[in-house]
Image: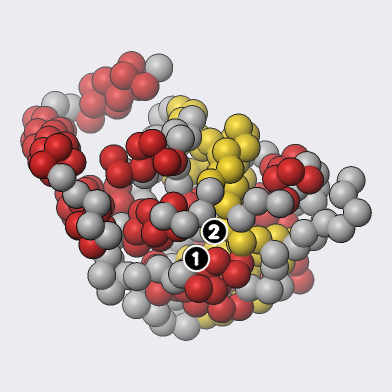
Amino acid sequence: MLPSQPLISVITINYNDGDKLEKTIKSVIDQDYEFVEYIIVDGGSSDKSPSVINKYAGSISTIVSESDDGLYDAMNKGIKYATGDWVIFMNSGDYFYDLSVLSRIFSIEDRTKQNIIYGDREIRYDSFSRKQLATHVQKKLWKGMLFSHQSMFTRRKLLDENSFQYQLFPIASDFDLIYRLSRSETFYYCGLLIASIDVGGVSDTNRLQAIWERYKTLEHYCDHSFYKKAYYVYLILDSLLRSMLKNIIPKPLVALIIKMKRA
């Protein structure tokens, strides 16, 4: 046990996702780490989300329910309410991989001296899941998301100074933020499974736009070349082909192919 345990602000964004929200909430409030500030930002849901939130209101530090301009606007809003030393986003449908994630990460002093800690994730599909190890940030970040914001702890002071630029990058604001931070900060890989993520997030359902915005991020920070442009052209063509094949091949066969490829 460290002499002074850091306070972790966990922020959950939700909008009309009441069916999945409860598991997310329980994965946060049932952590065996004591020093957690839990913030839920709801976009004014009209489903059962309000009743789910009220059910656990006693374990939630801050509840905000009002309209917003989308996911990343709500995430910026959550940062403004955070008072912890560290911030992590665990949005509705996602949850911590197990109930000891926070205690295992923040019980080691070397980690608490960092500014950004990231780790691995589990990705859940309809009928199976797979574990995805994070990749070294400084070497390959330009290729896209090497990990997710659900598996990344960031010093609150950095997020106070670096918000999500959703007006410039509506789909890939998380990539833009990570890329921006990588230009001045060192990312510490903890080697632990942090989050379990439900496929179907904003980047998954808008894949082509996400790829395009990631390349525009490189352009925005003057980190583009013919090779990098060619790589993103390849990603776009590959995504188009996959989309066409998914419309032709039966869904069970598509799932089987994905499962075999990721095994």
- Closest to the observer, 57 or 211: 211
- Closest to the observer, 252 or 242: 242
Res. 13 mark? 1
Q: Residue at x 15, y 45 (%)?
A: 225
- Secondary element under disc 1, as helix, strand or loop, is strand
Residue 138 visible in the picture: yes
In the rendered structure, the answer to whether residue 145 lies left or right of residue 188 reads left
- Residue 223 placement (x, y as % from top left): 24, 51
Asked if the residues shown at circle 1 and circle 2 are in contact, with their CB atoms under 8 angstroms apart, the answer is yes
* Vertical position of residue 48 compared to residue 132: above or below: below
Identify residue for label 2.
89
The kind of residue tagged 1 is Ile
Task: Compute the Cα span from label 1 to label 2.
Answer: 8 Å
Mark whose residue sits in front, 1 or 2: 2
Q: Residue at x 59, y 47 (%)?
A: 117
Res. 81 mark? none
Q: Residues within 10 Å of mark 1 (few under 14, many from 20)?
A: many
